Amino acid sequence: MNREIVIDVQQKGISIALLEEKRLVEYQKEPREATFSVGNIYIAKVKKVMPGLNAAFVDVGSERVGFLHYLDLGMQFASYEKYLKQVGSDRKKLFPFQKASRQPDLPKDGSVQNVLARDQEMLVQIVKEPINTKGPRLTGEISFAGRYLVLVPFGDKVSVSGKIKSGEERARLKQLINSIRPKNCGVIVRTVAEGKRVAELDGELNALYQRWMQVLERVQQNTERPLLVYEEAGRAVALIRDIFNPTFENIYVNDKSVMEEVKSYISLIAPDKAGIVSLYTGKVPIFDNFNVTRQIKSSFGKTINYKHGAYLVIEHTEAMHVVDVNSGNRTNAENGQEQNALEVNLGAADELARQLRLRDMGGIIVVDFIDMTLAEDRQILYDRMCKNMQNDRAKHNILPLSKFGLMQITRQRVRPAMDVTVEEVCPTCFGKGKIKPSMLFTEQLEQKISQLVNHIGIKRFTLYVHPYVAAYINQGVWSLKRKWQMKYGFGWNIIASQKMAYLQYEFYDAKKQFIDMKEEIETM
């Protein structure tokens, strides 16, 4: 399978697209100013203890406090608590972690008010992003995820992924990790560690242990509370860490610093594959070049079309997601109603599995398939859905169709579902419903170019417009573009961008920084 990653780095955010056979299957978009990230570790303060919920609200330095249930404190909470006191007692020298004493496990049926108190300091890690009005979900059981291993401070055992079926390989990995794991640390061996040599695993384990040491040093040296003491890797590296395998053929990035960050990580985990990371330098926007923009606009929204006129209707609520399968104008009398229903449902199962990954939909998903009378057809549909979901990295559970034709799916929800708005607000009327005559649009563009060159003094820039507009400006031997270049200089260029709405335009300087030239009230 041809698998590629395309990373679009912009001034306001970063977007990452995973393509399988040139088809978009995963998409993540995150603003640069995002304040939360799964995996971040904080030295935090307990804000409020809630005995009725057997939980506490914990301040991690944001306007929305985090939620920490008693069962998420971790079995070794007492060990963390004692060691943190030892670390905080001496600001000059770090108390050695190897000498930390393990305390008795936290009882599973205990009460939070017996363990936590207001203003108590503790280490917490984010396991779930804030969703709607809810703050982040926290855990007191710290872990550091790598490509092959997960390091768990104060853990006492080595666990091997259940997806590694060979008993001989499981025993080899367990024995190997036991011989190299640091004292007072547990290790989880991930599936991709199968067949790996000791040098690779030992190198990653040491790197993960150094991250833990850096956390302890920040806790010791800083008195500020709450405080971010460990920040998870950037979204590009985090995604690659979780999904990368030798079948990847290309990783394209349009920003040099992010490209070097990604290449450095690939060189660390798979030196022979470092060459697949490349810097995209084309003039056409990177997502347009790899047909990602078109797929985004056709794959998000309320209604999703798929094979032969059938379509899905997807509704999002805070509690669940509801999906309705419709046959549309599909008619095929030769096969009969039952066979048609099966074909439409199987196509829906294929598209739905892709949509779950693409939008990162989590929680409860209820799917209303077209009714089928034959039990064997319902089983075929269930098996198809299970097979399609095998490539999904999120934990999930699928129930067979109910007697009402409904399929219930639960999928791990870590961050809010991706819901990209594909409808475009008119850039020329700002939603008011009236625009200037479109025949005057090119005159407006020329005015902006003149303003940039003659008044602001920016002579090197790029103008992005809708492909239709670009075609009009570039047509002919003596085109509008050539006339403007003769008048205002040759240091600028016009690029067709699929993400632009009709009569929308954007200017960027030579350093790819956005130049705001848009005014709600335009004067000619």
Image (tube, rainbow, N blue to C red):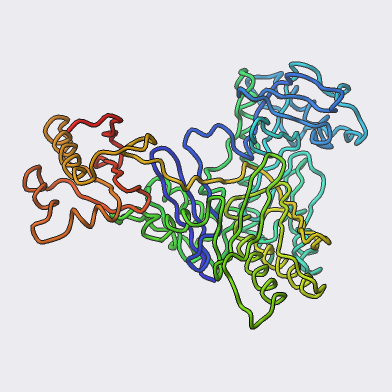
Left or right of 499, for residue 295: right
Q: Quadrant of residue 437?
A: top left
Please state which of residues 18 and 112 is positioned toward the viewer in this rendering: 18
**Can the viewer see residue 180?**
no
* Count of residue discs: 0
Question: Percent from the top left, x then y, of residue 519?
Answer: 28, 31
Say if 236 sits above or below 137 in the image: below
Say if 159 sits above or below 272 in the image: above
Q: Residue placed farthest to the bottom in the image? A: 334
- Please give the name of the residue rendered at 76% of the width and 59% of the height, measured from the top-left corner: 407
- Please give the name of the residue rendered at 42% of the width and 55% of the height, measured from the top-left corner: 293
Please state which of residues 270 and 49 is positioned toward the viewer in this rendering: 49
Left or right of 193, for residue 285: left
Question: Percent from the top left, x then y, of residue 37?
Answer: 59, 38
- Please give the name of the residue rendered at 51% of the width and 41% of the height, measured from the top-left corner: 30
Left or right of 499, for residue 129: right
**Can the viewer see residue 150?**
yes
Quadrant where the image shows the C terminus: top left
Question: Percent from the top left, x then y, of residue 86?
Answer: 75, 23
Please state which of residues 352 and 286 is positioned toward the viewer in this rendering: 352
Please state which of residues 485 and 108 is positioned toward the viewer in this rendering: 485
Q: Quadrant of residue 53?
A: top right
Question: Percent from the top left, x then y, of residue 463?
Answer: 24, 45
- Please give the name of the residue rendered at 76% of the width and 19% of the height, measured from the top-left corner: 48
Quadrant where the image shows the N terminus: bottom right
